[in-house]
Amino acid sequence: MQNASLKDYLHLHLIVFIWGFTAVLGALISIGAIELVWYRMGLASVAIFAYLRIKKIPLKTTPKALAVMLGAGVLIALHWLTFFGAIKMANVSITLAMMSTGAFFTSILEPLFYRRKVIGYEIIFGILVILGLYLIFNVETRYTAGILVALLSALLAAFFTLINGKLVKNHNAVKISFFEMLSGAGSITVFLALTSRFDSGFFSFQASDWWYLGILALVCTAYAFIASVTVMRNLSPYTVMLTTNLEPVYGIILAFLILGDSERMSTDFYFGAILILITVILNGIFKNRQRRKQQRLLNANESQVSV
């Protein structure tokens, strides 16, 4: 896009790098997945609300849109619960490799969600993703439970991504994020209250956890989201999509550097993860070409009508 600059590209890579670091923080934080997500969404909602007030962005919306946002917030909470749960059950590398299948699930659900036909290459790419998953399952049987939970997390991510894709067309993205974070934190609060989980131990943990939670909620969630909305104004969706696919790469490298041998995986695991990642990128390239072709046809038709 004409307004894009080197600063925008570097900023986007920084955001994706931060997202990749999220999984490492999940492994470093000693508390359970439920507590972790509650703190993350609660702190993030406060930070995003402050941003909305500073920017004087109104919160008013329609009841129907609000209901959809709140529902999406519950899905995001479930996604993060399964995401961090998978990290605790397996490790960062396994979880991020499985999260790469999110784009695959989206391509399967998109025809149902937007009522369009399935494209031939999507079936081929689906088979390649399944092959990548087979390679990982075949050699990392000790992490089967974690792999399945991570796949569920990727599926949930596909659902709320499609929902947000519709919401963002008519509503402010930061406002959407606020209601979703608030809804996610609220739904977990209800669960914790019903199960009598709120006690002195819930608010008492290691000093390092407070630091990590602060980084997770304020930097990896609130800042990264608001910054991504800003940088996307100057970069094409295609550029953003390709760069975002580097998140598992950054995350796996960071995990190996910070967490050490616990993240060392077999050769077949990396073959499977690379196959999934390449398939996701190719899917994005094909879809971008298709959009450009449709746009050219649309422009040509409009030109004929104007003549």
Image (cartoon, rainbow, N blue to C red):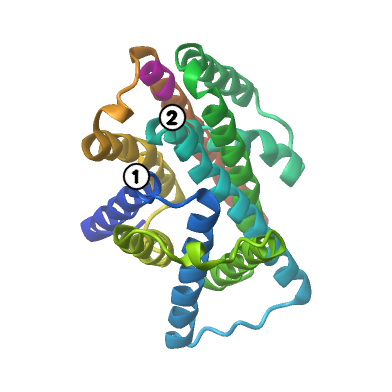
The residue beneath circle 2 is 94
Task: Identify which residue is drawn at 38% across, 58% down.
Answer: 220
| Residue 146 in the image, given as x and y percentages of width and height | 52, 31
Residue 120 is marked as none
Q: Quadrant of residue 119?
A: top right
Question: Which quadrant of the rendered structure holds the C terminus?
Answer: bottom right
| Residue 33 in the image, given as x and y percentages of width and height | 51, 49
Question: Which quadrant of the rendered structure holds the N terminus?
Answer: bottom left
| Residue 12 in the image, given as x and y percentages of width and height | 32, 54
Bounds of the magenta span? 269-273
Q: In which quarter of the image is residue 208?
A: bottom left
User: Is 131 placed left or right of 18 in the picture?
Assistant: right
State the residue in front, 71 or 30: 30
- Above or below, 59 against 166 in this view is below
| Residue 269 in the image, given as x and y percentages of width and height | 40, 18
- Above or below, 6 against 199 in this view is above
User: Is 247 placed left or right of 60 in the picture?
Assistant: left
Task: Identify which residue is drawn at 43% across, 18% down.
Answer: 272
Q: Main structural element of the magenta stretch: helix, strand or loop?
A: helix
Circle 2: residue type: Ile
Task: Identify which residue is drawn at 50% across, 79% down.
Answer: 49
Element under disc 2: helix
The residue beneath circle 1 is 24
